[in-house]
Image: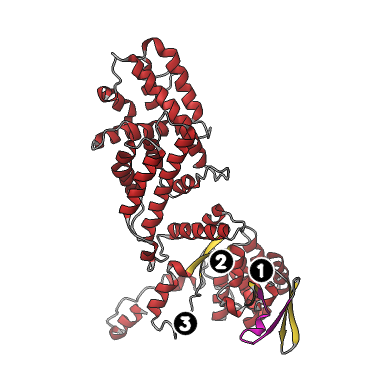
Amino acid sequence: MFETMNDRGARLTAVDLLKSHLLSHVQANEDQLNTQWHEMLRELAIDREDPTAASRFIKAFLLARCARQGHDEDRRQIDSNLNVLVRHNAAYLGLVPERPENFLRFVRDLLKSARLFRPFLAAGRALKKDGDRLEAVLFNERNGLSCQTVAILAAVDPDDRPSDAKDKGRIVAAYMDRWYALRILQDLPVQAADADALVHGTLVPALRRCHTVADVASTLGDRVTQDGGSVREAVTLGLRGNNAHQIRYLLARATAYVEEACQRPHDVLAYLGRDRFHIEHLWANHHHRVKEEIPDPVVFRSRRNQLGGLRLLMRRENSSINDLPLHDKAVKVGRTLYSVPWKLIGRRVDVRSTATMVQVFLDGELVKTHAALEQGKRTDRTDYPPEKIAFQMRTPIWCRTQAGQVGDACREVVESLLEVGALYRLRAAQGILGLRKKYGETRLEAACAKAIAVGDPSYRTIKGILIAGTETDPEPETGDAGAAAFLHGPQGLFATVGTPDATDGDHGDQGQDGVA
């Protein structure tokens, strides 16, 4: 009965069945085994909302230390039914009834390994700056290399000292991180299957033979030499639709490395996320600016997307810089870029710098003053052209106020757009108000009223009404029950080609009418 269900009537998991099998053969040491089993589970309880942590760890332990090399069936059984593997390979594992002490030793090794693995389990969930230098563990988890657990447990012996276990695991994680980056630079696949092949086919057999930290370092050092490849091979690597995550990872690590070397604060996790930092092209998508240097537009597009032409830029800076060349919008003093008024683009200016102030002069006249900054960028948004900062200046409140001045219909359209997801629909509201410049407020108000009447008060519909000049046309008696956004009437939608009549003599024109 207890081989299939527990005392609460719930079906046993593979981990429960494994524990039951071990308890049934340990004989007099049953209480001790049970105690150590529960201690192991507590060691793995880093995240209480992760009920599968123990199962994943035991599977990784079996793959790292118990699965037979060259026996793919062992790996499949561990993944699907790990307790069956222990039963079927009892002789190979030494878990036979004649040696009950081996069952207790097996659980004791599980417990020791769980204790040694606990720092890696925590490192895979959050970036810590406590001197352990286990950040590669987190990077590997984020990059889908969760199979690193198997490689780490293959290198770590249950009887290792905690410091030695950390050093071994750190070396293994760093090697896999390097392997991942190198594969990206060589434009090779980095799927889960590729990582599994590396771990189970190469690393586990080699790491099982290692005993000391020096052994692990030497073994993986030899692997680095055999792997070959270099950063120089990445000269053609570029951003594509399917590798943004990999490109962002390389840029994030490179950015953090440079910032750390310059002793500047940095946040590599922010670089890795998409909320605060964008992947930005150093060249705007304007071929004419570099046509003399790169005549071929195809070559320009390729080079623009190459790794060396990309960087991470804070979201707000990316929006403000837009597609103007940076040197056209700023002057450089020392290691700092200072913005200047947009009307000075292309003009030669003079700069006076003191310890507290930077002044910009045009023909001897003071045109801009900034507080001095040792390094970085000092930007005044009012220096940009009006059309470049319209999005920031024309806020939802501004849009509502301007719409009210146009008329009730325009105000209703803008209010409906900004009611939900105001920032997402802000450009549409700005676009509708921008139609005043070409068509005037009277026509815009009439077009908004027409769009509301047909049930589609969107920018595209309002603009289409204005272009067609139908904002003042009376509503036709369509009998369409108020079908939304249909401006031509049912006659136009359901028009049919007339049946040829032997008396009207229009056979030659019918084909043209049918096509039209």
As drawn, 457 above or below 109: below
Whole-percent x, y for residue 394 in the image: 68, 70
Amino acid type, callout 1? Gln
Q: Is residue 408 visible?
A: no
How many numbered discs?
A: 3
Label 2, secondary structure: give it: loop
Q: Marks 2/1: CA distance?
A: 27 Å
> Quadrant where the N terminus lies?
top left
Q: Name the residue under label 3.
A: 290
In magenta, the rendered stretch is 338-353
Which corner quadrant of the image does residue 457 belong to?
bottom right
Q: Which of marks 3 and 2 is in front?
A: 3
Q: Marks 3 and 2: CB-CB under 8 Å?
A: no
The quadrant of the picture occupied by the C terminus is bottom left
Task: Confirm whether the magenta stretch covers residue 346.
Answer: yes
Q: Name the residue under label 1.
A: 392
- Is 38 above or below relative to 437? above
Residue drawn at point x = 35 percent, y = 61 percent: 186
401 and 318: which one is in front?
Answer: 318
Q: What element carries label 3?
A: helix
Q: What residue type is labelled 3?
A: Val
Q: Name the residue under label 2.
A: 456
Circle nearer the N terminus (3, 1): 3
Q: Is mark 1 on a helix, strand or loop?
A: helix
Q: Is 90 displayed left or right of 28 in the figure?
A: left
